[in-house]
Amino acid sequence: MMVEEFVHIPVLLNEAIEALRVQPGGRYVDCTVGEGGHAAAILEKSSPGGQLLAIDADPQAIAVARGRLLPYGKSALLVNDDFKNLEGICSSLDFHPVHGILFDLGLSSFQLSNRGRGFSFQLDAPLDMRFNPSEELTAATIVNTFPEQELATIIERYGEEHRSRQIARSIVASRPLSTTLELATVVERAVGIRGRIHPATRTFQALRIAVNQELDRLEEALKQALNLLGIGGRLVVISFHSLEDRLVKGYLREESQDCLCPPQTPVCVCGHTATLELITRKAITPSLDEIRANPRSRSAKMRVAERIEKLSAS
């Protein structure tokens, strides 16, 4: 696929910029720069004097974003790294505290459409699914070498697929599998076609999450983001499936409370104090107009919190 043929539509763009409260001269971090749609809008809004640190584990995404952000010169700092190393990246560049941090999670349309990466069963490709091609674990390794029970657990846990045992049994019986269409066909034969969603959708999601350790990385990064935000700084997270959203919602809620002791505890013994204020009690979702223009946005949920002064426990 030629890069110049690709048209990227950032999800919840206006809502994200508003939630970040982007201002001239501000410093921001885009932890998942992708093709640079949100990043370009942040740089535009923070001009003059604004700076953006743009991070992505995918070197191809960084290459695309670099071209898109070229007009902003030294205002855009691009780093090909995993956001689980967020604090170290910012420390090495002396890029802290910051006014806002954005996570736009999940797959980009560029990655889905990129023949050879193996993220989609719409295109026949090797079973890869790595965001960072330098990592060792691939979807092919999981599909062809993991024990049946472990494979079923991955599909159930990360795909929320209740037919995981049937699917895992069929995968093991069909080994070796080398391409996305081979895998999709095996899953389809195992469970049949029901409804509008392809039966392999949840299995592909599960494998991708497992390959890239997405939930563990996100949990690590959220904790680091908290340490990088200045007082009044905003944390904005856009997620695309319930596992991500549940994790984000739980973390933000926990960090917005002064005490995490069980309800029956008469006196607080945990010593926890709130470091965030929830700006959105309910997730922000795309408008009908956005969903019509960009169907991929339909599952997006955005949550926002603001860094507050941490008070000493009394």
Image (cartoon, rainbow, N blue to C red):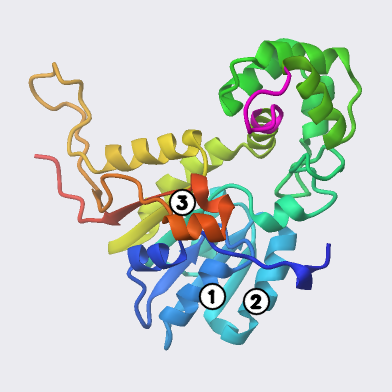
Quick one: label 2, few (<14), some, or many (20+) residues within 10 Å? some
Residue receiving disc 1: 40
- Asked if the residues shown at circle 1 and circle 2 are in contact, with their CB atoms under 8 angstroms apart, the answer is yes
The reply to whether residue 247 is visible in this rendering is yes
Q: Position of residue 9 (x, y in %)?
A: 58, 64
Residue at 57 percent of width and 84 percent of height: 72
Residue receiving disc 2: 68
Where disc 1 sits, the SS reads: helix
Amino acid carrying mark 3 in the image: Ile
Looking at the image, is 179 positioned above or below residue 102? above
Tell whether position 161 is magenta. Answer: no
Disc 1 versus disc 3: distance between alpha carbons?
17 Å
Where disc 3 sits, the SS reads: strand
Q: Nearer the viewer, residue 245 or 294?
A: 294
Task: First in sequence, mark 3 or 2: give its number.
Answer: 2
Amino acid carrying mark 1 in the image: Ala
Which portion, as a residue range, is magenta?
Answer: 192-202
The quarter of the picture where residue 46 lies is bottom left
The reply to whether residue 31 is visible in this rendering is no
Disc 1 versus disc 2: distance between alpha carbons?
8 Å
